Amino acid sequence: MNILVIGRGGREHAIVQKLAESAQADTIYAAPGNAGIANIATCVAIDEMDFGALIDFAKNENIGLTIVGPEAPLSAGIVDKFQQAGLRVFGPSEAAAAIEGSKSFAKDFMKKHDVPTAAYEVFADPEKAKAYIRKQGAPIVIKADGLAAGKGVVVAETVEEAEQAVDDMLVSKAFAEAGATVVIEEFLAGREFSLMALVNGRNVYPLTTARDHKRAFDGDAGPNTGGMGSYAPVDDIPSDAYDFAVKEIVQKTADGMADEGEPFTGILYAGLMMTEQGPKVIEFNARFGDPETQVILPLMQNDFVQVVNDVLDEKNPSLKWKDGYCLGVVVASAGYPGSYAKGKELPELHEKADTYFVHAGTKKQDGNFVSDGGRVLFAGAYGSTFAEARKKAYDAISPFEGNEEFFYRTDIGEK
């Protein structure tokens, strides 16, 4: 079948790479795609939010399956529009995507359905928010309610830092409408991990665990980013905690959404903290995580086209996983997640055995790859041991060493 992947980032490149392994994939299109995706798929210059043009394209090119990567089109109802046009699409409805699109909706949902998460309150008034912060003390977490490209979360170490975050979001409108209200949460201590599952209604098929490194700099210092590196699976999460997370968090959430008449289809992503009381939800996403997708899909043994079709047809995809580990490191533009320059030339990179590159923010200029975003590239590697995967990934990224136009963390997976 012809397949369309909607999106332009590293997550979409990883999805396209996995789809390209399938004998069931005829032509793979990406809209709009990126320079790395263009090496293995046909990129079409249609914006992710131009639903009419995407639907026309899918009909004209006889697209048998569309996979939606990013959160913005999902939250804006792209799946509903595709289904109304009679097209087969993998992703949640607009109503179901609210689990990511509104943090206050997600927190209220978790409270109602007894899904373990941090204590919280929601505020639109900055003075009331600050009074609550002073009462609770620090550390404390401030979140923009809406979509903020992974950057709308501040883990404040002091009351002053938390009050500044409130001012940035509610007064200075740093995240525009996404920050018109804020969720202020209890700080959860523990080890963070990601658990994604393929979901169709009450049918839940969990993937292997992964861990994302969100802070910009070594030692988990600096601001939150969209993710600076990741690895899978996560060995320090015991099997009983994994089973609890599947049953009491992911399954309970899928059942709750079905009970409320808004069943979820697609990838349900639970960002979790392994606390002393067990796993608790930090956040939900309504799509594949980035950069976790870049280390999870290479470990999947199944034909990914078959997997998605099985889930849509309410069949168990019988997921199988390779032994070993994948680890990857994000190369970012100097200045990210703040302001940064584009158009900086990438060094020459060479894929070796068990290493791979995933493009996030690149374009072609005069025949060379140049930067075109904050997170530029992901260097990933597979190893039979964790140490082997880590060494291969850092070897792959070594051409960037000393290049002041880019930076990357040197401690991904160190702990």
Image (spheres, rainbow, N blue to C red):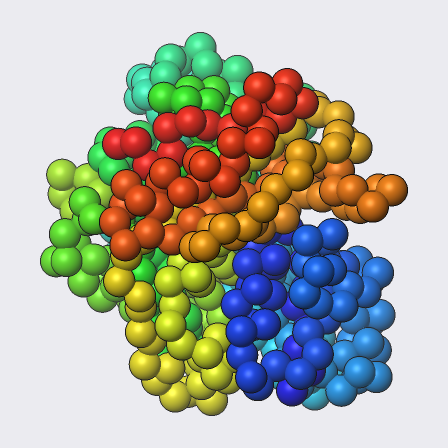
Please give the count of numbered marks on the rendered protein: 0
User: Is 321 rendered above or below residue 276?
Assistant: below
Query: Which residue is found at the position 46% from the left and 65% from the top?
Result: 267
| Any part of residue 145 in sight | no
Q: Please give left or right for residue 327 compared with residue 19 in the image.
A: left
User: Is 76 rendered above or below residue 84?
Assistant: above
Query: Can you tell which quarter of the image residue 215 is in?
Result: top left
Residue 146 rendering spot, x and y as whole percentages:
58, 44
Quarter that holds the C terminus? top left
Quarter that holds the N terminus? bottom right
Query: Which residue is found at the position 72% from the left and 71% from the top?
Result: 29
| Any part of residue 399 in sight | yes
Q: Please give left or right for residue 364 compared with residue 6 in the image.
A: right
Residue 123 rendering spot, x and y as whole percentages:
49, 33
Q: Please give left or right for residue 303 compared with residue 403 in the image.
A: left
Query: Which residue is found at the position 62% from the left and 22% from the top?
Result: 403
Viewer-closest of 98 and 237:
237
The residue at the far top in this view is 160
Q: Please give left or right for residue 120 compared with residue 28 in the image.
A: left
Query: Which residue is found at the position 63% from the left and 48% from the top?
Result: 359
User: Is 53 rendered above or below residue 49?
Assistant: below
Residue 336 rendering spot, x and y as whole percentages:
62, 26
Residue 45 rendering spot, x and y as whole percentages:
84, 60
Viewer-closest of 258 and 328:
328
